[in-house]
Amino acid sequence: RSEAEGAGHAARALHPGYVKTSRHGSWTTCAPEQLKLANVDVDVFERQDFAMPREQLLRRIKACTGVLCMLTDRIDSDVLGAAGSSLKVVSTMSVGYNHIDVAACRAKHVAVGITPGMTLSFPVPSCSHAYHVSAGVLDTSTAETALALTLAAKRHVVASVDSAKRGEWGVWQPFQYCGTDVEGSTVGIVGLGRIGAKYAAMMRLAFRCRILYTGPRPKPDLAAPLDATYCSMDDLLAASDICVLTYVDRFGKMKANAVLVNTSRGPVVDQEALYDALVTRQLAAAGLDVTDPEPLPVDHKVTRPT
């Protein structure tokens, strides 16, 4: 659904013209057809096993009216210059847009589009009215990924599977991969936005977790249904059993049995500090949906801290 809606959003933003896209997988079977129905000529990058090479993007973008790009496609002044004056819109199949030079697009009067959202209404306990929140089409997917990473990190799922594959499952050791309970944990969320609030609701309703959050300012509308408590970063790190979506360079302030989950952006986690925290047991485990660089090399030390 999110893929189709993202493509529809791009098609509506474009006038008939020559469009460059670079999406892999099943998207290529539905989005180009939607664009063609809008009388848009579509040029799709042919490969699925690697991202579009930079030189091809610079060459094939000439005379394009629009670009539907991915996180792997850096849209900067060089790309805009290669496209020329025909380029009217750059749309990305993502909520994040740090791979797009928005200032350069603005200077050339090129519109920028991201994955669309929707507005939902929820009742607030003890209130006579509902509050409204903008929900992105990827919010549930990302929150569920954060939940999966939380369970995997807390219960040592990956280490257990790797051990079984290596034939190390010998004499039964009751606490070898036991991990710690999720239920009743204190969850600290840095930045209680849409995704953070969705994840917090899952953790509170399913596992009766206590929710803490921090950020530039309190967010009572989002926090009230979650019974979430606003606090400082240091207090959150010290109290949390699970820390989610955080700028992490202060592992020493966290509990030794805490786990870190990052589904935001790879650079927000200092991976050298993360490695040190894992090998010195300052941190119990980490679940990473994003890394820096991305993808992380298979021989990177963070992938095998033990």
Image: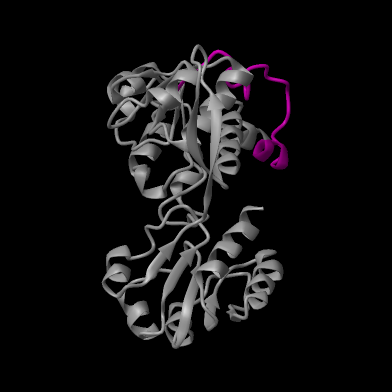
Q: Main secondary structure of the magenta part?
A: loop
Seen in the image, is 248 located left or right of residue 22?
left
Q: Is residue 188 in view? A: no
Picture coordinates of residue 77, whole percent (x, y): 30, 75
Picture coordinates of residue 39, whole percent (x, y): 62, 80
Residue 56, placed above or below residue 133: below
Front residue of 184 and 256? 184
Picture coordinates of residue 105, whole percent (x, y): 32, 70
Number of numbered discs on residues: 0
Front residue of 45 and 61? 61
Residue 51: say if magenta.
no
Residue depicted at x 59% and y 22%: 179
Q: Is residue 61 in view? A: yes
State which region is magenta. 161-188
Front residue of 185 and 93? 93
Front residue of 208 and 299? 208
Residue depicted at x 61% and y 57%: 5
Residue 164: say if magenta.
yes
Residue depicted at x 56% and y 19%: 204
